[in-house]
Image (cartoon, coloured by chain):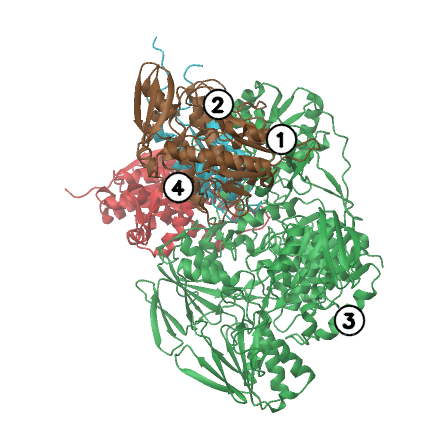
Chain colours: A green, B brown, C red, D cyan
Amino acid sequence: MEKIGAVLIVGAGIGGSQAALDLGDAGYKVYLIESTTSIGGVMAQLDKTFPTNDCAMCIVSPKLVETGRHQNIDLHINCKIEEVSGEAGNFTIKILKKSLHINMDKCTGCGVCGQKCPVEAIDMFNEGLAKVKATSVKYPQAVPLVYAINKDYCIGCGVCEGVCKAEAVEYDLEDQEVEFNVGAIILAPGFEEFVPAEGNKYGYGKYKNVVTSIEFERILSASGPYTGKILRPSDGDVPEQVAFLQCIGSRDLREGQPYCSSVCCMYTCKEAVIAKEHMDQVNPTIFSMDVRAYGKDFDKYIIHAQEEYGVQYIRSRISSITEDSKTKDLILKYETEDGKIISEVFNMVVLAVGLNPPNDAEYLAEKFGIELNEYKFALTDVFNPVQTTRPGIFACGAFQSPKDIPETVTQASAAAGCVNQLLYEKTGTLITEKTLPPEIYVAGQPPRIGVFICHCGINIGGYVDVPDVKKYASNLPNVVLADRNLYTCSADTQTIIKNKIEEFHLNRVIVASCTPRTHESLFQETIREAGLNRYLFQMANIRDQCSWVHMHQPKEATQKAKDLVRMAVNKARNIIPLERIKLSVTPKALVIGGGITGMVAALNFASQEYETCLVEKEMELGGHAKHIYTTLEGGSVQDYLSDLIQKVNSNENLHVYTQAEIENIDGFIGNFKTTLIHGDRKERVEFDHGVVVVATGANEYQPKEYLYGKNPLVIKQSDFEKLINTTDDIKNKKSIVMIQCVGSRDEERPYCSKMCCAEAIKNAILTKEKYPGVEITILFRDIRTYGFKEKYYRQAREAGIIFLRYDEKNPPNVIANDSQLKVEVNTPTKEVININTDLLVLSAGIYADREENEVLAMMLKVPINDDNFFLEAHVKLRPVDFATEGIFVAGLAHCPKPIEDSISQANAAVSRACTILSKDEIEAEGKTAVVNMARCSGCGMCVENCAYNAIELIEDRRFGLIASINQALCKGCGACSGNCRCAAIDVLGFTGEQIYAMIKGRL
Amino acid sequence: MVLKMGVEAENQNIEKSMIETANNLLKNKEVDVIIGYSKGTVPLSSAPIIIRREEDTDKLIWNNLCYVNLAKYLVPLMPQLCDSEGNSLKIGVVSKGCVGRALIHLAVEKQIKLDDIKIIGIPCNGNINRKRIEKEIGESEILELSIVDNNINVKGKDFEQSFPFDEYLNELCKVCKVKSPPNNESLAEVCVGECLEITSVEDDFSDLDEYESKSTEEKWDYIIDTLRTCTRCYACREACPMCYCHLCFVDQNKPIWFGKTTEISEIITFHLTRAMHLAGRCVACGACSSVCPMGIDLNLITRKLEKIVKGRFNFTSGIDIETLAPMTTFKMDDSEEFMLEED
Amino acid sequence: MSYEPTILGFLCNWCSYAGADLAGVSRLQYPPNIRVIRVMCSGRVDPKFVFEALKIGIDGIIVMGCHPGDCHYLEGNYEAEKKFNMLKKFLTFINLDNRIRLEWVSASEGMRFAEIVSEFTNSIKELGPSPLKEDKDLLDKLEAIEMAADSYRIRALVGRERTIIESENVYGEKVPQDKFDNIFNTAIYDEYMRCRILLSLKKNSKSVKVLASELEIDPSEVLEHILILKGSNSITMGEIEGITPIYEYTMEG
Amino acid sequence: MTVQTVDDKSINENWEPKIIAFLCNWCSYAGADLAGVSRIQYPPNIRIVRVPCSGRINPNFIIKSLTDGWDGVLVSGCHPGDCHYISGNLVARRRFAILNELLEFFGIEPGRVNFMWASAAEGERFANLIKKVTKIIKELGPNTKFKKKWC
């Protein structure tokens, strides 16, 4: 059975889109299937996202637009899976494409049908807070921007067909049956929020002012129904006292799911912070049990929220909510930690609802033949969390287990990494390279500009006098052709443009229509197909920024349209053809660090027949995982480790250098050259490669507190694990005490090491099983067994292990009295408990050594954050890339994480790297910066300003010390040219001359 | 400004020990060449001089008229100041406070290498505001000038006048906080007289309060009056150590950003853009005002530049070679009070 | 002198007007209060005419057309019936629905014409004079109704009702009457409320709670309407007094 | 025939200022598009110039716009942290801060040149800020300070 170089991805949320982009860039044909009418999933509904508080739309829409128009990605919306057959490497899938009753190719998304439709329905995107018409688009920036008719609301009155100038409405469009033949499948259908059932004790559904967190997200969103103002649904007032209730539908055996949904602690804190930021009158109070802020910079976020924004945390679970019928305020009754019963009045309550599996989870499992776990999420392998029970089918994102956006994006890339491993021989087989005519040489010709003005149905023509603008444009200097058409972006007008280019020998094309953000590349492709360099093109936005926003001032709108066209023509006179620089790529990879992460990454590269070099500074491989025996979920780490080491040493594409040190790395993406010294004889090895994966791991904290090192009865958790797994000296111990958060979440290391709670509970359960008589007490600040690990926390409590909370302000102190230790614990109820114990186990955290990381960071010119871990390019959208292209990070070097997350990140890094290695040459961005050597005085300001390290000072024979730009790394942002005093640096496509000409266009 | 023993006497004292230092620096080959001030060809002026041989060191002078910033000559001269094989000579620079700061900042901007430079530190007690005295004397020519216990005696062909020293100092020198080069240990430096260690500068910029309390129109009128007489001769640009661009923005074409005429709006544009280029780089040496043939007082703008950069980024130019100039870096919590918000 | 109501009658030229003439020829007597306007077809009567009549204080309005199937223009009377239903629904909000009547009178039914007119005149007489003359608040409500009835949404629904219920909609199916009715009724109610909110805000800016008390509906419902009006840029949120945002009417709405 | 010199032109009420706006492509330009898609009306005085990032905006652009006769300048970038190029807007913020203080120091009316952040989801906020800027510049009247007097 022959493998196929194509992939089916089910679900086009942020996870599905990331996997599609990775695989599309790596040269696979991707069929992206979405059940709703536009891509973006839940992330598109969010206002801001933690931990960076940046606006979800700003971050996700460029990625969605790229997915929408990627050459290798076929996007199919409104689909339903019918039937799946075949096996790894060769699947056939039948899909039912439900009709939108609107022809996707003709619809331009202008929205007139939506305005005129007489039927109003509940807007599910805004969680029922607003109304939407029967013909609608999910949200204004939807990709693809296509309207759809919702059949169960539509009464078929035919009004929309009447008003649609593009004749896109075709009521009789049937559902289509489509069949795909692919090599692998990735399931990323996301999750469903938990909705409290009828008659729930929180009054959701009964009291207006009790809303779920996703509804509150829409209330917060600037593009939501309340346009970012925090109002309460009962009377539109600003709620001054807002209560947030955690764990609704999670960690709850009766009404919800037993597991922890992992993300509610963080998004609740974010919602509280953003509400306070939007409106200062709002005072958020969060009722929580444990605050599970386990990820990178999460703890800092919580502390910052408490200090900066006055978010108040109360540690208790609400028993009941009653409503004051007159004021519609809510009375909450709760018990504080020291036992007092308090009832407080709040104007609004937000329920932090958990994450359920998608509604069609069983349906998908049955169709794709994969097993689900006890909570109906996808059952995956302990040591490869994206591999489902059926080979060739992978799962990622919340469908695998509840997780946040950074982890979802990482897992999406990891799934793409596993697909690479499966189908690597077949890259590039199914993608069609477009054959383009040779470019016409236009340099030196006088500018001959063609201006195409668009009516966009009535969207422009209805408010701007397009014929007048056309007449005006036709007698602007250098304009040889001015034309107007009903829809410039429609397929037939593209051919008109191509013919006019030939007929009038145009060497500059201007389209005055809508926003270049979504349509520039469409027209650039068209003029390239007519033989013109794609950069000889300019757009004037006379719809979104003119006709639509000056509807009641047609005269001024027409004048503005003329001005915008004239400014575009002025700029067009100065544009020059640009090439995208091509760079060769050495298809080899360097992996630094031989722990589990490094080995998994190196193996993945090697199994795709990329020559790989693995560098490890210790004597033997294994890294941090050497002294871990099992994972909380029961996987045996030592067997996995030994099997991994055996595979690494036996793979012929993989050169392993232990006891090795990197002397120097230079070069850039695709063309790195590394020299390293290895072995006790310090041999020197040269290795050139295309990509670098940093998997240098981190170290275990050596505790200084709690008499560690001074008293033999005080040991670390890792020593304790060795003890119970290899010896049985615990036999005669009567009482063991464990202390959590040792060396984590304190002044120097203000972060959570994420795996110590799981380690402690794993060892405690194992000890209880082996020696039931031993009394185990765990002193904790927050038990952070997120996700499905919650089950083991409950299992520990049922096994009789005592959990005692201590406050970080006065931690327990340890006094040695002869053969035992006395541990004094001051609990929040202010009375002190003394425990005499035979053994004290400290859960030591993870820390990154500044000197070690700084050396490597200097060589690779990549940043480190203030906790000394490596800083990735973007927390959410590029979690495993560095800002400098071609270098990736994975494992503990990025931040403390359990083994399965490190493995995911390793595969993700490989997938990201394959988008480079799979090509023999990569195209850099055309609009990059360029230095005018005569003007540059070598002051070095641009070198500091460049976030991508694309500029360096070189000694030039004629001009002395000047700046020189590495076109491969430059992104064309222009931060350098903004500060350049002698205007020596320009950004092609936005040069000083072009902007000067636009300024001159005032008239 | 408290003078221990008369300005004139102190200067002679410094001059003598400076010549001495220059001699033994040249003698034991610590430096190959020394740049300092020598007697000007016209009374009330001084001229830069490059000394290679020991016997010329007595040409070096030090008085209150050494207003030129010697750091200016280093950048263009660097290529020529090297021996036959092309490796650069060791240069000694007579540097008062602002010259020292200029050297440090030029090193930060990679124009000079400080290990080729030997800073000969001078505790400066300010330059005389020559333009102001000439304006008050009117047309007649000054032949001789001397400073006797806190006032300046000026003699001409047929007149004699004296001015209080403190009053007729250069505006910037009155409020100057960095009298001698900020010698932190990393610099190879020798000091004539006592140079104090300066790591940071505290300044309340109260001299600007009077101007800044004016209304926008009054400010505009004041600026027009001061700059109206500018003839675009660019003497200020030629005197400024920080203006070392090969092709200044006013001389560029493709595109010609700003006009070259002496029309008031184009004068304002030139000075505004030059001020923008000097933010965080100007070392307040006052050379631009001293050399201006039309007697335009640019010190107000210089003070404002220092105030902005000190207030916003707690940075003073030319103090320490490690910290990056403000425009080359950023902080997440930089002040953004000027940003527009919805009301 | 006892109160004499003013009645306005729209008579379709082919049937009811001829019926009226027949009543005249046969010297049938009926009260003189009715003033007749001849229209070519009962379908010609635009809801605006009825609102205008009510606004100037006419006490009762009657529209007469041909019996279904007799219409000279085949379907005019069917359209008239749909428009009359919409009118009735709107006027029930201010219980003036009993002051309008739709009757079918053929050219040969002189007797029926006279009976209908006298019966209608007596029923209006019992009702007394139209309250619109002095009740300013009621006039505002009528103003809102007129505005709502003129909205694109209502006219589209009324205009398309017959095709999609009696013959077939664009999908070739018949829309069940109850499904259409509940969409139509919610549309009528929503548009009426929104127009009342718009007119009220036109006078002076108000908060949601003030509007709710004025319209006697729950504040959360007012909020929903406010959001939709804000979405179509007919109102904007002004500043927030304490915890209550004030909404203002925008001219460009 | 009285020669009407530039500066004594009384500000008749139907004078409309011409404002140039430099918008960063990823956030502010997207915010302007969202205002369009949501049909939020705002005065037609601004002319938008798209730049890749607020970091690209050189002081020459702003000063040239004033001397070339535009009545007002608006500069808008992404909120700190949103920048598509990681730190383009942060580098620019310092430059704008210094330029803003210098303009005010030189006696240019504050409000002639305005700086703001706008994200891709803040359509309504973008429109409100445009209304505010237009109102400010309309009150300031035509830009006579930089107009060439005699050539």
Work out how far the residue at label 1 is from the one at label 3, CA to CA, in angstroms: 67 Å
Residues at circles 1 and 2 in contact by the CB criterion of under 8 Å: no
Residue at numbered disc 1: B81
Q: In terms of secondary structure, where does tag 4 sit?
A: loop
Q: Is residue A50 left or right of residue A314?
A: right
Q: Nearer the viewer, mark 4 or mark 1?
A: 1
Q: Are marks 4 and 3 in contact (CB under 8 Å)?
A: no
What is the chain letter for disc 1?
A: B
Tell me the crowding category of disc 1: few under 14, some 14 to 19, or many 20 or more residues within 10 angstroms, Cα based. some
Q: Rate crowding at label 2 as few (under 14), some (14 to 19) or many (20 or more) other CA atoms within 10 Å.
A: some
Q: Residue furthest top?
A: D1
Query: Mark 4 vs mark 1: same chain?
Result: no
Residue at 53% of width from left, 40% of height from top?
Answer: B104
Q: Identify the secondary structure beneath mark 3.
A: helix
Measured Cα–Cα span from mark 4 to mark 1: 75 Å
Q: Is residue A942 visible?
A: yes
Which residue is the site of mark 3? A643
Count of numbered labels shown in the rendering: 4
Q: Are marks 4 and 1 in contact (CB under 8 Å)?
A: no
- The image position of residue A613, as x and y in percent, is 78, 57
Q: Which residue is mark 2?
A: B235
